[in-house]
């Protein structure tokens, strides 16, 4: 088949295993093609060089409609009742673009994937197209998944138990479940905790409607209630307010959770208790500067405490600053023996500036 000036191929109306299939040419160090095969809610990627062989084995006879888009023309193949394809050509105004693999950002959740949470969130239309007005939200969600994906890329995990604290109805819990179950093929049990009974009831209804059988939501206060007491692998805290983040992190340390993804919010505790007394006094002279420095100090202490608990910690920009001022993620992975390397430095800060920090207090206990 002619592939000169090929822009993309789309095969639909499936007769076989896959619901839909797309192919596009890619120009890397060598020229090749990339196929995306859709099955249920999963997407499978395949790279290949021999277009004719792939077409014969993976496309022909397995789809009723095949649309092949070239620069300037579209070829439509329609399969009749006798198994033969009828061919129709029309003109188009498409122009072949740079087909470099890096020509545009490739997202983990791509347009066209059947992710029901993105539809309910208003990011996708009912036919799974991106709503232009929600494109920033679409990028934020994918950015979160990229940070998670980076941590799990070569771990070999086959099953996980995940706790999501103060989850609310943000839909990120549902998207996280979708990512692990359908994108990574990892068996997960996900429990979302929130204080609001009506929110929890609604989220459980949504999970049931999606068919997410291993996702449940529970009314609980992380600061005082008994939580899941079996082995946990990962905790997520996205904008858990003020010291609720500290209780969740302390729980992760206590349970030996291997992975931590935390985006703290409303770090009031240090800001309300800190006083002047050292070399950093200049930062506490003006209210707005004091608030921001206190938030950064809070998260720095949290990261240092997690390092002493045996975690390899990095702090990453979660979303662009223009979208949210709370844009730091604390990401941790348990892989070291606990130490007291940062203990004296933290104690000295507390002694000098007199602030209270809940995670520091909880772990000292």
Image: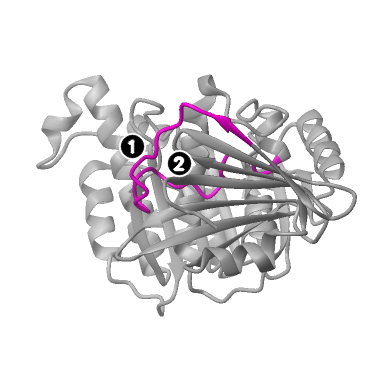
Residue 342 point in image, percent of width and height: 28, 65
In the picture of the structure, the residue carrying the numbered disc 2 is 264
Q: How many numbered marks are there?
A: 2
Nearer the viewer's eye, disc 2 or disc 1?
2
Proximity of marks 2 and 1: CB atoms separated by less than 8 Å: yes
Q: Against 270, is 20 above or below? A: below
Residue farthest right in this picture: 81
Q: Position of residue 135 (x, y in %)?
A: 49, 28
Residue 199 occupies quadrant: top right
Please give the range of residues in magenta: 89-115
Give the residue displayed 56% in from the left and 58% down from the top. Answer: 35
Q: Secondary structure at mark 2?
A: strand
Camera sees residue 242: no
Taking the view exactly as shown, the residue that stands out farthest to the bottom is 337
Q: Where does label 1 land, which residue?
A: 295
Q: Tell me how far mark 2 sits from mark 1, CA to CA.
A: 9 Å
Image quarter where the N terminus lies is: bottom right
250 to the left or right of 32 = right
| Residue at x 24% of width, y 34% of height | 275
Badge 2 crowding class, 10 Å Cα cut-off, few under 14, some 14 to 19, many 20 or more, is many
How would you classify the magenta stretch by its main secondary structure? loop
Q: Is residue 114 magenta?
A: yes
Q: Position of residue 358 (x, y in %)?
A: 45, 47
Q: Residues within 10 Å of mark 1 (few under 14, many from 20)?
A: many
Side (left or right) of 325 relative to 211? left
């Amino acid at each position: 088949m002619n592939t000169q000036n090929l822009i993309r191929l789309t095969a639909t109306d499936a007769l076989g295993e896959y619901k839909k299939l797309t192919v596009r040419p890619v120009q890397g160090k060598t020229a090749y093609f990339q196929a995306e095969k859709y099955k249920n809610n999963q997407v499978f990627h395949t790279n290949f060089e021999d277009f004719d062989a792939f077409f014969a084995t993976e496309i022909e006879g397995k789809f009723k409609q095949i649309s092949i888009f070239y620069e300037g023309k579209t070829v439509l193949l329609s399969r009749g009742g006798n198994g033969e394809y009828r061919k129709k050509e029309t003109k188009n105004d498409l122009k072949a673009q740079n087909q470099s693999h890096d020509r545009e950002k490739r997202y983990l959740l791509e347009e066209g994937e059947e992710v029901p949470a993105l539809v309910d969130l208003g990011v996708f239309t009912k036919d799974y197209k991106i709503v232009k007005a929600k494109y920033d939200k679409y990028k934020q969600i994918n950015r979160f998944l990229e940070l998670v994906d980076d941590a799990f890329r070569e771990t070999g995990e086959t099953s996980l138990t995940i706790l999501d604290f103060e989850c609310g109805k943000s839909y990120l819990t549902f998207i996280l479940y979708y990512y692990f179950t359908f994108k990574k093929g990892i068996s997960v049990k996900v429990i979302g905790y929130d204080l609001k009974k009506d929110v929890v009831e609604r989220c459980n209804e949504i999970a049931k409607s999606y068919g997410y059988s291993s996702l449940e939501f529970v009314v609980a206060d992380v600061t005082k209630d008994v939580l899941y007491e079996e082995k946990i692998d990962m905790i997520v805290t996205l904008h858990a307010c003020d010291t609720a983040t500290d209780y969740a992190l302390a729980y992760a340390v206590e349970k030996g959770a291997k992975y931590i993804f935390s985006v703290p919010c409303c770090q009031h505790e240090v800001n309300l208790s800190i006083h002047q007394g050292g070399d950093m006094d200049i930062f506490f002279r003006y209210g707005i500067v004091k608030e921001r420095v206190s938030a950064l100090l809070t998260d720095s202490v949290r990261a240092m405490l997690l390092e002493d608990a045996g975690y390899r910690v990095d702090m990453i920009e979660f979303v662009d600053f223009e979208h949210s001022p709370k844009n730091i993620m604390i990401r941790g992975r348990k892989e070291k023996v606990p130490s007291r390397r940062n203990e004296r430095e933290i104690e000295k800060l507390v002694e000098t500036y007199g602030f209270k920090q809940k995670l520091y207090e909880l772990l000292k206990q």
